[in-house]
Amino acid sequence: MTESTSPPARSQNTSYVVNKNGADQFVNILQRRPDGQVYVHYDGFDKRLDEWISGTSLRPANESMRKRKRDTPSPTPTKPETQPDPLMTEEEFDIKHHKQITARRNFDKVNFGQWRIKTWYFSPYPLTDSELEDSTGLPGGSASTSKIPGVNRATVRSHGRTSDLLAGGLTRSHLSGEKSILWVCDRCFKYMAEGAAWEMHVKQCDRRHPPGRKVYQRGAHIIWEVDGAKDKLYCQNLSLFGKLFIDVKTLFFDCDNFLFYILTDADSQRDHVLGFFSKEKISYDDYNLACIIVLPPYQRKGYGMLMIEFSYEVSRRAGKIGTPERPLSDLGLRSYLTYWVATLIRFFRRLLSVLPPDRSTVMSSGRLPDLTGVLPPPSEDANSRKKRAKGWDGETPDSNSTFATPNGLDDTITAMRTVLTTSNPDGSATSHVVVRSTLAEIASATNLRIEDAAFALNECGFLASTLEGVVGITREMVEAVAKDRNVKRMCLDPAHVMLT
């Protein structure tokens, strides 16, 4: 959670204030425990930050608002609504129930291999037999008639997704301590409610890598393609585990229509799962990604960007211009904006360079060099190649990897640009690259949707000033954005993609 210097925003349902990281935050109470613990949502923040806190740390919001109350105009009283609720569609009905059901996490932590990770969201793991007995033993509690605030009852019409969620441990909210921990095998993703059963399972589980086939391998990093129709149980367990960290609207236990791409890191014994993304086998909107998750212990290491770049490479090889499925989460939008901006910056760098990135000088005999095309790379003496620091494939590529672009892009660059050479008084000449193109041509060259490219260009400030619908972009502007947004080289090397 990031601290804010301005007063926190307050919703209409907020009634308490709690001090969090030295700052007052408005909270909503979602549930209370008999021991005085309360489950709160921080107003204005994502619900992955919801947590159990001591009820003694709460203060009525009115006390904090008294000093500002004089300066705040009182709201105009309105008459209570007397009109009946409008008829909802089945999808709206399902969304309403889903929000109420998944308002709080049903597990506090998950034990995954050597990691004990705090969960972010609700995941509909089915109740075990022992949990069913515990839930029916609660005062007024019943596993078959779990009460949810605002949800009268579950019916067949309320969709299979809601039925799955109702079976997904709604009564776990009373659990605490070790009972609030989920145990998951980091090899096959089988889940257990008790640590003893988990320890017995991991001693016997002999899976060394995900099922399916390799579609990318660069050093120890491998991406596996798993068919949800062929490996149903593995993909179902993977989806349930991913739901702990993804706030998606629905979760389908029928994975037949999805492909899962799992990123692993290999050691001498086996492959360790770092993250995964899924995509529909047939998407009429050409979505190249349905959901993506990098496990919390491996975040902020470039693995998410590697999977995003791979998803676009899959679309490019299929002759399609892909885009992620909407709506995007706050973290998803941030990651995709980084990818779109980096793709455009690398393209503009290559487009607005007179010489190729691996050339600082050009020599020719008898006639002037042709700068309109792309010159062949210079030959490199194998003996002069130096060992470099470890990177994605064991060695860090040359500096020209910053300009790395998908195969076939050089022809596009050649067709779009014009080299203008002007003479100098001393007999020398200066060359400049001039490019005139449309937004659609830029989007096509970078394999981005037009709306995604336009959004990224606007976020970079390139569309701030236009003259009669024409936008001017210089190399200096490109470098300024690259420095401001810390644009890095591509994580993906298309040469290591194993798709046919």
Image: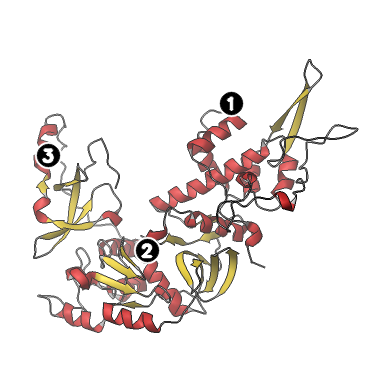
- Name the foreground residue: 200 vs 119: 200
For disc 2, the marked residue is: 91
N-terminal-most mark, 2 or 3:
3
Instruction: Looking at this view, name the residue that lies furthest to the front.
Output: 383
Using residue 413 as the reference point, say whether residue 213 is left or right of it. Answer: left
Which amino acid, by three-letter code, is at mark 3? Ser
Image quarter for residue 222? bottom right
Q: Is residue 317 above or below residue 474?
A: below
For disc 3, the marked residue is: 64
Q: Is residue 27 above or below residue 151?
A: above
Say what secondary structure mark 1 lies in: loop
How many tags in the picture? 3
Residue at 29% across, 72% down: 182
What mark, if any, has residue 467 been given in the picture? 1
Using residue 55 as the reference point, say whether residue 471 is left or right of it. Answer: right
Rounded to the nearest angstrom, the CA distance separating label 1 from label 2 is 44 Å
Q: Is residue 127 visible?
A: no
Using residue 289 as the reference point, say whether residue 63 is left or right of it. Answer: left
Say what secondary structure mark 2 lies in: helix
- Residue 233, position as x, y percentages in the image: 43, 79
Image quarter for residue 104? bottom left
Say what secondary structure mark 3 lies in: helix
Which amino acid, by three-letter code, is at mark 2? Glu
Q: Are marks 1 and 3 in contact (CB under 8 Å)?
A: no
